[in-house]
Image: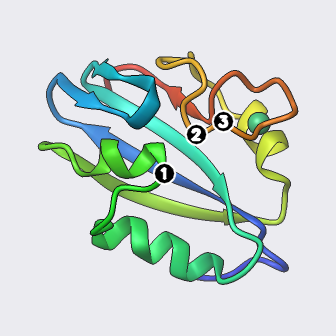
Amino acid sequence: MSTPRKAISYQLVIRVARAVTVRVGALGQVRFAPGRYIYTGSAKRAIEARVARHLAGARRLHWHIDHLLAAPGVRVTATRLSPRPECSLNQATAGSIPVPRFGASDCRAGCGSHLKYQGRH
Ligand SMILES: [Zn+2]
């Protein structure tokens, strides 16, 4: 994985092979349709370690995304690092909002969700 200058945000390209219902912390039970999702996150330090943590599968489910990635049939198919602020990157990403507030608990930019659904591919 190459690092663009001062990467401060990252995206995970996620494939959901079949519909899954996942308990996502305070968001409750959420059903995810099969298809491709893009999750946008940030880490001020050690961003590569954060991405590696997502790829390895977190032992403790802390962020919303941890719950989705722990579900059967769900995997990360690509990762991207970016120097853009996460909300700007997220808002420039095509797709619908499958789960309001997912990954956006501390978003102040009105994203609605930091997870986008790009349909079945
Ligand atoms: Zn945002």
Instruction: First in sequence, mark 1 or 3: give its number.
Output: 1
Which residue sits furthest front?
A: 26
Residue 47 screen position, x and y as percent: 64, 76
Residue bearing mark 2 = 103
Q: Quadrant of residue 61?
A: bottom left
Asked which secondary structure carries label 1, the reply is loop
- Residue 104 is marked as 3
- Distance Cα–Cα, label 2 vs label 1: 7 Å
Is residue 91 shown left or right of residue 25? right
Mark 2–mark 1 contact, CB under 8 Å?
Answer: yes
Mark 3: C-beta under 8 Å from nearest atom of ligand 1:
yes
Q: Give the camera-side residue of 5 and 41.
A: 41
Within the displayed image, which quadrant is ligand 1 positioned in?
Answer: top right
Numbered-mark total:
3
Point out the image quarter for the C terminus.
top left
- The three-letter code of the residue at mark 2 reads Gly
Residue bearing mark 1 = 63
- Residue 32 is marked as none
- The three-letter code of the residue at mark 1 reads Trp
Instruction: Please say if 76 is above or below 106.
Output: below
Mark 2–mark 3 contact, CB under 8 Å?
Answer: yes
Asked which secondary structure carries label 2, the reply is loop
- Distance Cα–Cα, label 2 vs label 3: 4 Å
Asked which secondary structure carries label 3, the reply is loop
Residue 80 screen position, x and y as percent: 59, 62
